[in-house]
Image: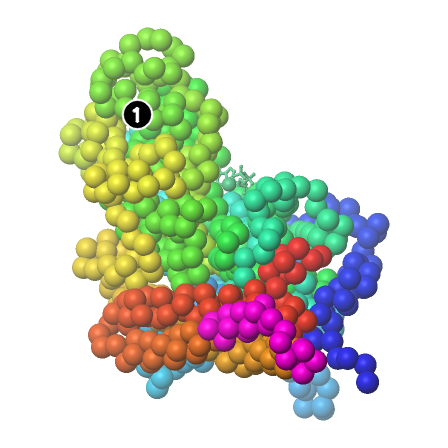
Amino acid sequence: MTPTMNQRLAAVRAISTESPHSGAPERTGTRARLPDLFGSLVFNDHVQRARLPKSVYAALRRTIDVGEALDPKIADAVANAMKDWAIEHGATHFSHWFQPMTGLSAQKHDSFLTQTSDGRAILEFSGKELIKGEPDASSFPSGGIRVTFEARGYTAWDPTSPAFLRRSANGSTLCIPTAFASWTGEALDMKTPLLRACEALSKQSVRILHLLGERDVSKVHVTCGVEQEYFLIERQLFVLRPDLVATGRSLFGAKPPKGQELEDHYFGAISQRVLSFMMDLENELWQLGIPIKTRHNEVAPSQFELAPIFEQVTVAADHNVLTMEVLKDVAERHGLTCLLAEKPFAGVNGSGKHNNYSLADDLGNNLLDPGHTPHDNLKFMVFLSAIVRAVDNHQDLLRASVATAGNDHRLGANEAPPAIVSIFVGAQLEDVILSLVEGRAPKSSTSGKELRLGVNTLPPLPRDQSDRNRTSPFAFTGNKFEFRAVGSSQSVAWPNTILNTIVAESLDWMSSEIEKRGGTGYRREVIQALVREIFAKHKRILFSGDNYSQEWVQEAERRGLFNLRDTPSALANVGSAANAALFDKFGVCNARELESRSNVLNQAYVHRLSVEALSMRDIAQTMIMPAAFQAQKRVADSIASVLAVNPQADMRTQREHLGQITDALNRLRPAIAELVKARHHAEEAKGSPNDVGRAFREEVVPAMVKVREQADLIESLVDDDLWPLPKYRELLFLH
Ligand code: ADP
Ligand code: MG
């Protein structure tokens, strides 16, 4: 009988013998020209102009560009053109594509099929079907807004985000980006509050620009570029790890001999296997009109990053959700699995999402561009101070916007931005700000002139960062801010909703102050004095040092900054009366909607930890313990066989090894029991969803750490050929 190889080793052998390109489509060498490819699956402006009657096109553009309400009369014409275009591209179905509060996309496909009385099929798509859908909302998270008997939900077409085709082997589906609300009109999705927050921010930005003398500006939009980090592992190994399958992250795994210490992966040459994946991915994303620009290896082994060119934030948010979906699909085609979890592997870097954020007016000016002239400088300082004030006043909200169970493994660990929110503006700009506050000449100013406050112009401002700070959670990078605490698997819609809301609040407050102080006729001195006051009051939020250091934790505490270390702490105050008033004032969420969001986030945390705890129990009991028993038996048999030949033999080595396995098992067993008990106890916790979350944080998380400790020790003791779970050295280094 041939010895059976365990599944893990069989998978490793298969990976080593298979050609690295197997499974990849035959695209190599036949890549279409990028300009032909780009946007070919999108019902974009170009297609709309070509296919819609002139008046319909003009009406649709007015809705998209200036936010005019959509004329329902044009819907039929748009629907018809969309359908014809989709069918020409192989579509049989359409789907309202939306983002419930899971942060993923949701879709229900309907075919264009209509039957005629004589039994034939024709394809139809009406304006009504385009504008409104009625999916059953009862199985989406609502955080208490909707009870099951009020199951109806509505999806409403969002014309500002273009429809697109999702292709699969046997056909295409027309996806129509929509907003999703309950029948009572309350938002149940990520999109609606973002759209509302964009409107609020635009209104307040225009208002202050008018006070700055820029009366031609009528709209301001948020620009956003999302850098996305991800891991790629062999699919054959992935399927042998029930923890990765169920939770997206490894709950077990002894530290490999080689991690990321050698720093040989970051920006390293991309392997052929991965490059072929990336090119396929880019082809697909480009066709969807997603402007992917960069690709590179990241810090951890098997970790990569891509970044698109920035777009309007609502489109960027949709595109990022779509990018995550396509990443997973294309990886699968290549025999790989894309892991988007924030911390799939202990001991190496986790993945984040850098949310690059700026504001642009409808004349094409970036409002965070320091500019050359004193006027631009002042405008820049106004928006900079508004953001500084917003971030300082609402550190906790910003922290809450990135609070998830997955991100808890990143924020605060020594690799990602800390849980303390602060702003890095660079030494030069910080000096300009402080000199303004202190009434002295800036050290770094190239003008060398004394800055007389209130009357003088500001000095030329640094355009490029002389230094880069990779440790800051919120960094100014030349002409935009980069919010780096966002989790890799998260939708950027919610963090940007919060950012827009708090910045709108700041701008509103500033405009009102300027008006109160009689600064309506573009009085520079009034505006400068206000900017100076804001910086004086909020400079504590600026920090350019090492955000990972222990000194910063202490310094931040002295400055009175929040340090919200985990999700339940970060989410505790989201629904407070003050926050409810803030969101309500700017029309972003009413109190019920905000509370529901807060509940959904707390519940998601609990569900995730619950699934992790149960996966851990199952894997420990059904895979790890049996492997250890087999290993014990082998050693015991070995002892018995040797003693049979030589009863006097010194069996110290075997006995010690056996003893170590036995001891670890004897610690593992009660640790599992503790975990099960902790989970049960936490689930029974009384109080709000946040209280339940806190119980999970306090009881379940430490119990999981204990189980893992013993299991990872056992991994290091058990015979390699008996170990069922692909090891870190295989997951991270085999491609
Ligand atoms: P880095 O890794 O140095 O941060 P990248 O080039 O990888 O730089 O990413 C920068 C991201 O910022 C890109 O997505 C880019 O399009 C985006 N970006 C550049 N300018 C703006 C802007 N004005 N507003 C929003 N995002 C921007
Ligand atoms: Mg970056």
Query: Residue beneath label 1, please?
Result: 433
Residue shown at 79%/50% (left/top)? 32
Q: Position of residue 418 (x, y in %)?
A: 37, 46
Label 1 packing within 10 angstroms: few (<14), some (14-19), many (20+): many
Residue shown at 51%/50% (left/top)? 349
Relative to 202, say whether 609 is above or below.
Answer: below
The residue segment tinted magenta is 642-664
The reply to whether the magenta stretch includes residue 644 is yes
Nearest the viewer among 474 and 699 is: 699
Q: What's under tag 1, amino acid-wise?
A: Ile
Judge: label 1 CB < 8 Å from ligand 1: no
Q: Position of residue 566 (x, y in %)?
A: 33, 58
Residue shown at 58%/50% (left/top)? 259
Nearest the viewer among 165 and 465 is: 465
Q: Residue furthest top?
A: 449
Q: Residue furthest front?
A: 648
Relative to 253, say whether 394 is above or below.
Answer: above
The reply to whether the magenta stretch includes residue 266 is no
Relative to 128, say whether 351 is above or below.
Answer: above
Q: Position of residue 657 (x, y in %)?
A: 56, 69
Q: Residue furthest bottom?
A: 118
Q: Main secondary structure of the magenta part?
A: helix
On the rendered structure, is 611 left or right of 149?
right
Q: Position of residue 654 (x, y in %)?
A: 59, 71
Nearest the viewer among 88 and 120 is: 88
Quadrant assignment, res 575: bottom left
Can residue 563 be spotted in the picture? yes
Can residue 362 be spotted in the picture? no
